[in-house]
Image (cartoon, grey):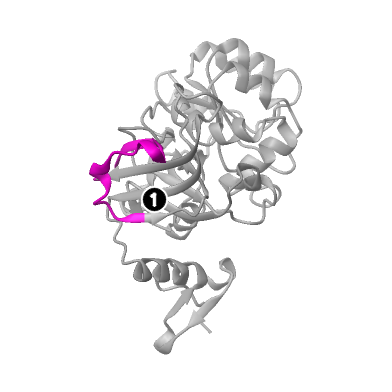
């Protein structure tokens, strides 16, 4: 018997809560049913334009607003042609945005879309799931092959390349990545290295943009801080615990998914946030910032990770009115709706 998948989002039966079967092998998952009901019952067409009202808490990441996340209670967000045109207190929203299709957020929390700073995703189903879970931008760890590159153009999120390597040499040790470009490295990958501190010392003369790490044990955090470079951190279940809070206080810190698939793989940005809070001493606000604005800054995507005027209309609406609920249960997806460039993708 062939595996049943949702005809709308392509999620397999084992990846969804419930799959409704129809004639001729057509099926739809519960999440797509909810999305279809919302769109038809409210006659919504979010094709790049949206007005989000009744936002209980808006996390803007605007440095001109107090707090780590630039939080604004009782807010509204206007998106036109895929760009945020206004974000702020609901009472101050200009009337010129009343013509946009409305979505009542019911007092829920609204965040910038997550940025996965070093995803290992390599298939369309994975990207679809990432988008459903709130990731709107991701960096693929290495240059994709031509077939993968062609599929990237149709992915439901923005994708860039993080690590460059010589053709046919991926995965490679960090030394090969560096030497493939005449001794100049974008990032040094210390994940899976037997002695990351030794590899760190050896790679410093290459003057990289930053480091990709999965283990913050020992003196590595202090050594990273002294470089004043960005750090991409992949928190996973079985890695030694370490103080990510010290790095966060000093450097642009980005969160990412990854890890060994057979042992401690983390393929969810929500799980990365939960692990950063539970095991690595970040507050929920610091972890969310690292999964949104911090990742964008580390990757030099300056316009991402914000909900401010002029930023892309990439927003996540949590199915809760409390930010803390995002880390209450790592197995429970807290995402209600996701917009990518003002288009409703979940």
Residue 281 in which image quadrant? top right
Estimate the x, y position of residue 190 in percent, counting from the top left. 61, 28
Image height of 68 relative to 345, above or below: above
Estimate the x, y position of residue 34 in percent, counting from the top left. 47, 69
Image height of 129 relative to 187, above or below: below
- 264 falls in the magenta region: no
Estimate the x, y position of residue 208 in percent, counting from the top left. 48, 18
- 87 falls in the magenta region: yes
Image height of 323 relative to 17, above or below: above
Estimate the x, y position of residue 61 in percent, counting from the top left. 47, 30
Residue 201 appears in the rendering: no
Residue found at x 68% / y 15%: 222
Q: Which residue extends farthest bottom?
A: 23
Residue 221 appears in the rendering: yes
Residue found at x 57% / y 74%: 18
Q: Quadrant of the C terminus?
A: bottom left
In the depicted view, which residue is nearer to us: 163 or 318?
318
Residue found at x 49% / y 31%: 295
Left or right of 212? Residue 341 is left
Residue found at x 47% / y 26%: 298
Q: Which residue extends farthest front?
A: 91
Q: Which residue is labeled 1 in the image?
A: 339
Q: What residue span does the magenta drawing correspond to? A: 81-102
In the depicted view, which residue is nearer to us: 281 or 45?
45
Residue 332 in which image quadrant? bottom right
Disc 1 element = strand
Image height of 17 relative to 192, above or below: below
Left or right of 147? Residue 230 is right
């Amino acid at each position: 018997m062939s595996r049943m998948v949702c005809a709308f989002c392509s999620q397999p039966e084992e990846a969804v809560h419930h799959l409704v079967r129809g004639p001729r092998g057509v099926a739809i998952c519960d999440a797509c049913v909810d999305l279809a009901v919302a769109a038809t019952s409210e006659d919504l067409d979010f094709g790049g334009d949206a007005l989000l009202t009744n936002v209980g808490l808006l996390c803007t990441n605007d440095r001109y607003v107090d707090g780590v996340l630039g939080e604004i209670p009782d807010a509204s967000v206007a998106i036109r042609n895929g760009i945020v045109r206004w974000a702020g207190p609901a009472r101050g929203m200009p009337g010129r945005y009343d013509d946009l299709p409305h979505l009542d957020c019911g007092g829920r929390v609204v965040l910038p879309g997550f940025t996965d700073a070093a995803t290992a995703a390599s298939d369309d189903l994975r990207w679809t799931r990432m988008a459903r879970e709130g990731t709107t931008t991701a960096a693929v760890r290495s240059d994709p092959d031509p077939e993968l590159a062609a599929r990237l153009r149709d992915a439901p999120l923005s994708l860039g390349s993080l690590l460059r390597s010589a053709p046919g040499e991926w995965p490679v040790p960090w030394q090969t990545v560096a030497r493939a470009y005449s001794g100049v490295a974008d990032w040094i990958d210390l994940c899976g290295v037997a002695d990351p501190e030794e590899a760190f010392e050896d790679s410093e003369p290459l003057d990289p943009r930053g480091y990709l790490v999965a283990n913050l044990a020992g003196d590595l955090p202090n050594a990273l801080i002294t470089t004043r470079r960005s750090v991409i951190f992949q928190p996973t279940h079985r890695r030694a615990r370490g103080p990510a809070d010290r790095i966060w206080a000093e450097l642009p810190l980005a969160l990412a998914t990854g890890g060994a698939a057979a042992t401690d793989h983390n393929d969810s940005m929500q799980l990365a946030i939960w692990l950063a809070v539970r095991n690595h001493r970040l507050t929920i606000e610091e972890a969310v910032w690292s999964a949104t604005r911090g990742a964008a800054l580390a990757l030099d995507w300056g316009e991402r990770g914000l909900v401010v005027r002029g930023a892309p209309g990439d927003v996540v609406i949590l199915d809760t009115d409390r930010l803390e609920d995002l880390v209450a249960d790592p197995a429970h997806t807290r995402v209600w709706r996701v917009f990518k460039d003002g288009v409703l993708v979940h």
